[in-house]
Image (spheres, coloured by chain):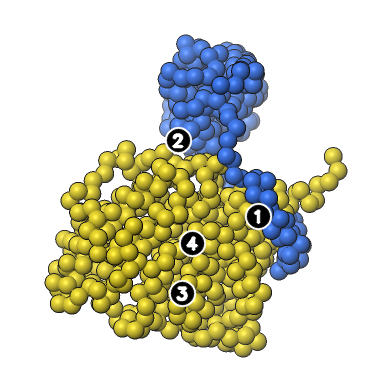
Chain colours: A blue, B yellow
Amino acid sequence: MENRTEIGMNRTGMQVSPLQMKKMEEVTKLTQPSSEGDADALAALRATYIQEADPLGSVPPPATVKGVAKTGMQMLGGKRPQVFLDKLGERLAFERGGTRLYDALIGKCALPQEGPEVVSLEKLRHFREDEAQHFALVRDCIVQLGGDPTAQTPCANLAGIEAMGLMQVVTDPKTTVVQSLHAILVAELADNAAWEELVMLAREMGQEEMAARFEEAAGHEREHLDHIKAWHLEATLQEANARAH
Amino acid sequence: MPTKLFSTAGTPIERQKFTWKDLVQKPISKLDDDAFTRVRIILMNGVEAEAVRFQHACARMNPDLQLALAQVRRKEHHQATMVNWLLGADHSTLETTIGYEQVAIEVTASVAQTEPDPYLAQVYRFGLLEDFDHMYRYSALMDRLEGKDANNILQSYTDILPGRPTVDEHRDPENDLRAPYDRTSTQPLSKLHALTIMSGEQQTHNFYMNVGPTYADPVARQLYAEIASIEEQHITQYESIIDPRESWLEKWLLHEACEVYNYYGCVQSEGNPRIKAIWERMLDYELGHLALVRRIFEEVEGRDAAEILPDAIPEPIKFESQRDYVRKVLAEEVDLRADGPDFVLRKDEPANSLAYREQMNSGGSPSQTVAAGYRWAPGTELNLKVVNY
């Protein structure tokens, strides 16, 4: 795989063919729309569906059997535990998917190749392990609260949808290491914000011990973000400054 | 390439072999490959998909042919896989959709100009102006949903303009049926054209029905539902021009000839050497199928396949911009409507179509909504509207 950005025969723009471009430029003037209005018409149609929509789904009820730890659901009196469980489900899904995202990037970086050498494979493997550990941490917290860590909650479902594009970028054999790193950067930016939020949410729910463990995870994620951001910047600058072949 | 191509032996079926790596090759570049390479891929996937569907139907009605059909169909299926998997994953579903409509416009326009039968040429022009409008509606959706310019896919070969408005394309089924050609007197090229266009429309219908529900946006879900309904009408139209009195074996022979004809056209026009090599290989495979079916046909029906197939391969479909022709047809025929198998002026459209349309559009028209006031502009409509920063 070519691991560099090159000038080539990109055919998507108008300037590729000046003759065809002139013809396409006539199109705007030739158009007589068959209905009046503008893009707001889409919003109006969407509004009718939004008003009628059912929710994505629900959070499964936590177990109420005896023996749920003291730190469990009964400690959340007066709060809405489903919100906490939903966000825990989201983090679980994101960390599990993040582990696989790192697996794909590690596979790509482990190949002999031209291009940026700023990425440390050892660090990437370490980050991958962190993500897997975070998955296990959240799983244990859900169990501790009497929740079902195998269930897909609404926010967990959306975490998967949000990550679909990232997975497509990293696993595409055509994408370079730097292009893949950018997808990981997007993931880590979201992950950082999410862990900070989860710490605050755990405190709000009176789960101080969990909050402390989430603080620790948030620290790992800050480290990931700092490295990924720096690697991406450095690799991009390196490529821009490299002498042309 | 020999003019007596239909008589060439090709690759014998027992030597047609694949591996999974073979089936899943490097995709084309969405950015750098010519748009007509994508057009050929989408068209040939449709032609292969029709081969598979036809052979299944044939097997259900002809127990004596089941083994030969199963053997050939396995190859067709793997050919379809190899061809369809050439599309890169960096195409959004809407970008692939724009590619499908470019196929419908450019290929149908080329066919309409070389079709020897004037009535059939009229049928193609009629369908062409409807697919032309779909391009405009999907381009509006792409612009307003994804913020992307459909011309990145079209590469300036194809106009983005309203055609016969999709809102007016909904007809009573009676007015989608056309008069079939006569199998005994129609030129072979007409038969190959009809199969090609029907295959393309059928695959387009399959595609829209599969991807429509993958959108979250209700506007997109409605637009795909509406245009898929027109594609269903188009399949009805195009299958009805094919003579139903052709025997099963005659139809199978024509299907194989259609595949040969189209791969031959791909070989002639392809500029990407790696993809051209695939078209050459597929052409040889299809010649192998044709030779096999020719033997079965002659043995079972006791007549010469040369009665059905032409001596020389007809002029292939042109994979190039048909902009001027399409603009001319648009100016002259956009107001035509269908009355049974005939084409009439808008004022004479039958009441059953008007009633059906009124019912379908009574809760609003997705295609009118998505393109409300829409004018395509280079770099999306935001390029027209956002001038201050």
Q: Which residue occupies the foreground of this view, B176 or B314?
A: B314
Q: What subunit carries mark 2?
A: A
Callouts 1 and 2 in the same chain: yes
Disc 1 to disc 4, C-alpha distance: 17 Å
Read off the residue under disc 3: B115
Read off the residue under disc 1: A20
Q: Is residue A135 visible?
A: no
Which numbered disc, 1 or 2, marks the residue closer to the eye? 1
Q: What subunit carries mark 3?
A: B
Callouts 2 and 3 in the same chain: no
Q: Which residue occupies the foreground of this view, B275 or B95?
A: B275
Q: Name the kind of residue labelled 3 in the image.
A: Glu
Q: What subunit carries mark 1?
A: A
Which numbered disc, 2 or 4, marks the residue closer to the eye? 4
Q: Residue at x 57, y 60 (%)?
A: B321
Measured as percent of width and height from the top left, residue B133 is found at 61, 66
Q: Name the kind of residue labelled 2 in the image.
A: Ala
**Residue A187 lies in what quarter of the image?**
top right
User: Contact, CB < 8 Å: mark 3 with mark 1?
Assistant: no
Judging from the image, what secondary structure is the residue with disc 3 in?
Answer: loop
Q: Residue at x 24, y 74 (%)?
A: B306
Callouts 2 and 4 in the same chain: no
Judging from the image, what secondary structure is the residue with disc 1 in?
Answer: helix
Read off the residue under disc 2: A151
Measured as percent of width and height from the top left, residue B119 is found at 48, 82
Disc 2 to disc 3, C-alpha distance: 59 Å
